Image (cartoon, helix red, strand yellow):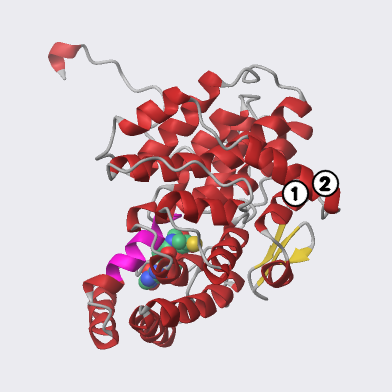
C-alpha cells in the first residue's frame, strides 16, 4: 500500500472542477476565471453563482440569486435567542454551534434532493452573515439591525454590524475581500466538509465540520494572530520588526506567512496589500500597513517566506472597523460559498472518503495483563 507524507502533502484526494491553484506560478482561479480577473470585475454574488454553477450568471440569474439571498437573511428566533445567551463566548464557537442549529429549524433539512441542497446552500450563505452580525450586536448590548434589502451581502454585513451604511469604497473593499477568500481548492476546512458530505451526511453537518477546521491558527485563525502582532507593537514598524525577529530567533512561526501550496506570492495577498494601504490611508491606520510591510520585508528576506491571504487581510479588516475576534468568522462568511460548492460537487459524484493509516504502533498480539497486574 502506498504511504503518503505527513499532512497528505502533495496528494491528489479528489477530482474537482471548482478551483485551480498553481503554487509555483502563483495562479488561483475559480471555474477557470483568474482571481485577478474576478477581484477586478466580479461582485461577490457573481462569484457565489460562479462557484455553484460553473459559469457566470446572466442579469436575470444574478437578480434571482440576490433576491434569494436577501429573502433568506432572517435567522430562526431560537438561533437569535441562543446568540443572545452566550455573550462572552468565542465567536467561532458560537458560529459553529449556531450554523449547526440552523438545520433544526429548516423544513428542508431531511430533503437530500439537488433542489433542496441548493436552497440550503442559499440559506447558509445568507444566514452565516446574519449570525455573525447578530451575535456581535447582542454581545455589545445593542439592538439587532434589520437588513437593508437594497444592499449587497458585503454592504449589508457592514451595515448590520456597525449600524452605519458603508461608503462605496468600504463596501467595495469588503466585497473584494469576500471574493478573495471564497474558495481555495482542498484547503483543510473544505476537505473536512467533503469528508463529511462523502458519508452522505447533510450539508449543515458538512459545513459545521468545515467551521471547526477553519478555526485553527494554522488555517483561518491566523488573521486574528496577525493583527495582535501588529497591535502589540503599537503599530510601530521598528517594534514589529524587533518582535518578529525575536520570534524567528526562537523558531516561532509568524502568523500570515508560509503556505502549503504557494511557493511564490499568494495572489490574494497582492490585492489585500493594496486594500490595506488604501484603507489605512483613509481611516488613519496607515501605521498598520507600514508595520506589515516592514515585517513582510524581514520575513521574506530572512526566511524566504511570502505573506499569505491572512497577513494583509488583518489590517484591512481592522481599518474596516471589524472587531478582531470576528476576523475568522468573516472568513467563514466568505468561504461558505466554496464549502457549499464543494459539498454540492461531492454529492453529484460521491464516493466515501476513507484513507488508510500507516500503522506505527506496537506489534499485534500484545499479551493481556489483568488489571491488578498493570
Ligand atoms: C501555512 C502553514 C501551516 C503551512 O504549513 P506546512 O506546509 O506544514 O509547512 P511547515 O510548517 O512544515 O513549514 C516548512 C518550513 O517553513 C517554516 N515556516 C513555515 N511557515 C512559517 C512561518 N509562518 N513562520 C516561520 N517559519 C515558517 C517552518 O518552520 C519549516 O521550517 P523547517 O523546515 O526549518 O522546520 C505554515 O506555513 C504556518 O504555520 N504558517 C503560519 C500560520 C498561517 O499563516 N496560516 C494561514 C495559512 S493561509
The residue that appears at 27% across and 38% down in the rendered structure is 87
Separation of residues labelled 1 and 2 (CA atoms): 9 Å
Name the one closer to the observer, 58 or 147: 147
Q: Which residue is mark 2?
A: 61
Graded by Cα atoms within 10 Å as few (under 14), some (14 to 19) or many (20 or more), the crowding at tag 2 reads: few
> Mark 1–mark 2 contact, CB under 8 Å?
yes
> For residue 181, which quarter of the picture?
bottom right
**Residue 359 horizontal side relative to residue 336, left or right:** left
Ligand 1 placement by image quarter:
bottom left
Which residue is outermost to the left?
A: 372
Name the one closer to the observer, 146 or 97: 146
Say if disc 1 is inside 8 Å of ligand 1. no
Callout 2 secondary element: helix
Q: Is residue 156 visible?
A: yes
Query: Which label sits in the foreground, 1 or 2?
Result: 2
> For residue 29, which quarter of the picture?
bottom right
Q: Quadrant of the C terminus?
A: top left
The percent coordinates of residue 354 (x first, y second) are 61, 32
* Magenta residues (range): 218-229
Q: Which residue is mark 1?
A: 49
**Residue 289 horizontal side relative to residue 190, left or right:** left
Graded by Cα atoms within 10 Å as few (under 14), some (14 to 19) or many (20 or more), the crowding at tag 1 reads: some
**Residue 311 horizontal side relative to residue 40, left or right:** left
Amino acid at each position: 500500500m502506498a504511504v503518503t507524507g505527513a499532512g497528505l502533502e502533495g496528494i491528489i484526494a479528489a477530482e474537482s472542477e471548482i478551483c485551480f491553484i498553481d503554487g509555483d506560478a502563483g495562479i488561483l482561479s475559480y471555474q477557470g476565471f483568474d482571481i485577478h480577473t474576478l477581484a477586478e470585475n466580479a461582485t461577490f454574488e457573481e462569484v457565489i453563482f460562479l462557484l455553484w454553477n460553473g459559469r457566470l450568471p446572466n442579469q436575470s440569474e444574478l437578480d434571482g440569486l440576490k433576491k434569494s439571498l436577501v429573502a433568506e437573511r432572517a435567522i430562526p428566533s431560537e438561533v437569535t435567542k441562543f446568540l443572545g445567551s452566550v455573550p462572552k463566548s468565542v465567536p467561532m464557537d458560537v458560529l459553529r454551534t449556531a450554523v449547526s442549529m440552523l438545520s433544526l429549524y429548516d423544513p428542508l433539512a431531511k430533503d437530500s434532493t439537488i433542489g433542496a441542497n441548493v436552497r440550503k446552500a442559499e440559506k447558509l450563505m445568507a444566514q452565516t452573515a446574519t449570525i455573525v452580525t447578530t451575535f456581535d450586536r447582542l454581545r455589545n448590548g445593542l439592538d439587532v439591525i434589520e437588513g437593508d434589502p437594497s444592499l449587497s451581502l458585503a454592504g449589508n454585513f457592514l451595515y448590520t454590524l456597525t449600524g452605519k451604511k458603508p461608503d462605496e469604497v468600504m463596501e467595495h473593499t469588503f466585497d473584494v475581500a469576500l471574493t478573495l477568500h471564497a474558495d481555495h481548492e482542498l484547503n483543510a476546512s473544505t476537505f473536512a466538509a467533503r469528508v463529511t458530505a462523502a458519508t452522505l451526511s447533510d450539508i449543515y453537518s458538512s459545513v459545521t465540520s468545515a467551521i471547526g477546521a477553519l478555526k485553527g491558527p494554522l488555517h483561518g485563525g491566523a488573521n486574528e494572530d496577525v493583527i495582535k502582532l501588529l497591535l502589540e507593537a503599537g503599530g510601530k514598524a521598528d517594534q514589529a520588526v524587533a518582535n518578529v525577529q525575536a520570534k524567528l530567533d526562537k523558531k516561532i512561526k509568524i502568523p500570515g506567512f508560509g503556505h502549503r501550496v504557494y511557493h511564490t506570492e499568494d495572489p490574494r495577498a497582492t490585492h489585500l496589500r493594496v486594500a490595506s494601504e488604501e484603507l489605512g490611508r483613509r481611516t488613519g491606520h496607515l501605521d498598520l500597513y507600514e508595520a506589515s510591510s516592514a515585517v513582510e520585508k524581514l520575513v521574506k528576506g530572512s526566511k524566504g517566506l511570502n505573506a499569505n491571504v491572512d497577513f494583509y487581510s488583518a489590517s484591512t479588516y481592522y481599518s474596516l472597523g471589524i472587531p478582531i475576534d470576528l476576523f475568522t468568522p468573516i472568513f467563514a462568511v466568505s468561504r461558505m460559498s466554496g464549502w457549499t460548492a464543494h459539498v454540492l460537487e461531492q454529492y453529484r459524484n460521491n464516493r466515501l472518503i476513507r484513507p488508510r493509516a500507516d500503522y506505527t504502533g506496537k506489534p499485534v498480539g500484545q499479551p493481556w495483563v489483568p488489571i491488578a497486574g498493570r
